[in-house]
Image: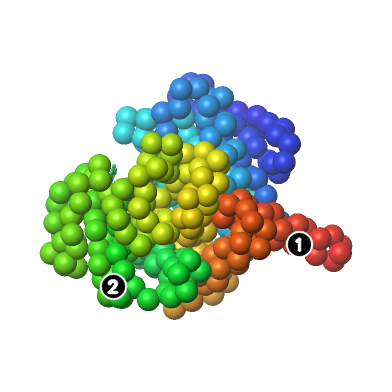
Amino acid sequence: MNITEIAVPGYERVARAEDPERGFTALIAVHDTTLGPALGGLRIWKYASVAEAQVDVLRLARGMTYKSAVARTGLGGGKAVIVGDARKDKSDALLSWMGRFIDSFAGRYITAEDVGTSVLDLDVIARETRHVAGRAREVGGSGDPSPWTALGTFVSMEAALLHQTGSAAFRGRKVAIQGMGHVGYWLARHLAEAGAQLLVADLDPARVERVVKEFAATAVPPDQILGAECDVLAPCALGAVLNDRTLPNLRCKVVCGAANNQLAEDRHGLLLKERGILYAPDYVVNAGGILNISVELAPGGYDSAQAEQKVRGIAQSLKGVLDRAQREGIPTARAADLEAQTLLAAARGKARAAS
Ligand code: NAD
């Protein structure tokens, strides 16, 4: 394996691994380990070039630092990518090779599942390195993160509603959910139990039918869900759903969902603020999965009661961000980034003082 170090300002370590004979190329970026070892998933994606993969791994690693900081996981941020098509190129040989690359970081980078990788792939990687998290419960891992992401989204919604309307109660409220997948389904369950009226959409009619039957939800065509009149809109499917085309049609008081990168561009956070819609920043809301993983990495091992306590704590983290945005008169997404930077600076200051 040829490993090339890449100097990137603001990043602790970035490296590229190549195996020209077998055509393998991968990158690992460790953005910041001030708060703990860098955790971030392994993505396998058909990047057009290695340069494009590098841009992506840097962006994602930095995002993990911020997400973990605000969620107080006790972890830093990193990410790994393999250049390739997960359906065609993924093999035990590729994953084992990647496991050895991860191991060369000696625990400063810990990998997990992401787009293009599964829990079964993690088992293959784990034969080469112990720096793997988010594995199945049967092998001592923290299991499926989705119900935890949904719980974190639910408690975030309560905090956002309280901030925006003065009441966190769901009875008599309408919540529109885009995407009835792993997270959307569990979120619908929490909301139905809390008495919310649900409007739901998915491209897969069977997924919609299930929640209509189980939770008396109302089905909405996928192309109408973002414009549905509701108290809370919960994007739980795709990124970039808050854009120039969709923003003028929103008819909600709050946007709070699990999808990653909901704002097409930063300026859309400002546009939401100007329209009087409270945006609960995605990476604060959807940290339940990573908090669950952080419990797996704690000295005593995984404990679901501790995971629940940590995930419920997202409400408090979000409150801190929303209060800051209000105090400083800035968009909530900007407040989340500032909150992360403040926490990192404080930890760096403490470390300096101790040394
Ligand atoms: P999933 O693939 O299980 O579900 C997504 C659902 O959205 C699918 O049912 C799909 O059919 C539907 N969908 C796609 N396009 C749609 C459209 N235009 N209109 C309506 N429905 C559409 O994914 P998931 O695990 O439930 O994750 C949902 C989102 O949350 C993703 O953006 C993911 O990145 C993010 N997220 C998930 C987790 C987690 O723990 N699973 C953690 C953090 C963030």
Q: Position of residue 278 (x, y in %)?
A: 48, 58
Q: Amino acid at mark 1?
A: Ala
Q: Is residue 342 above or below residue 6?
A: below
Q: Mark yes or no: residue 168 visible.
A: yes
13 relative position to 138: left or right:
right
Report the residue marked by disc 1. Answer: 346
Q: Secondary structure at mark 1?
A: helix
- State whether label 2 is within 8 Å of ligand 1: no
The disc label shown at residue 265, or none? none
Q: Position of residue 324 (x, y in %)?
A: 64, 62
Quarter of the figure with residue 5: top right
Q: Position of residue 21 (x, y in %)?
A: 48, 21
Query: Residue at horizontal 38%, vertical 36%?
Result: 245
> Which quarter shows the N terminus?
top right
Q: Is residue 76 above or below residue 72?
A: above
Please identify, in this view, whether the residue under mark 2 or under mark 1 is nearer the observer.
2
> Which quarter shows the C terminus?
bottom right
Query: Residue at horizontal 18%, vertical 55%?
Result: 219
Between residue 88 and residue 116, name the one nearer to us. 116
Q: Residue furthest bottom?
A: 305
The disc label shown at residue 172, or none? 2
Q: Secondary structure at mark 2?
A: loop
Query: Residue at horizontal 52%, vertical 58%?
Result: 284
Q: Is residue 41 above or below residue 141?
A: above
- Tell me the colour scheme of the image: rainbow
Q: Amino acid at mark 2?
A: Gly
73 relative position to 305: left or right:
right
Q: Position of residue 330 (x, y in %)?
A: 62, 53
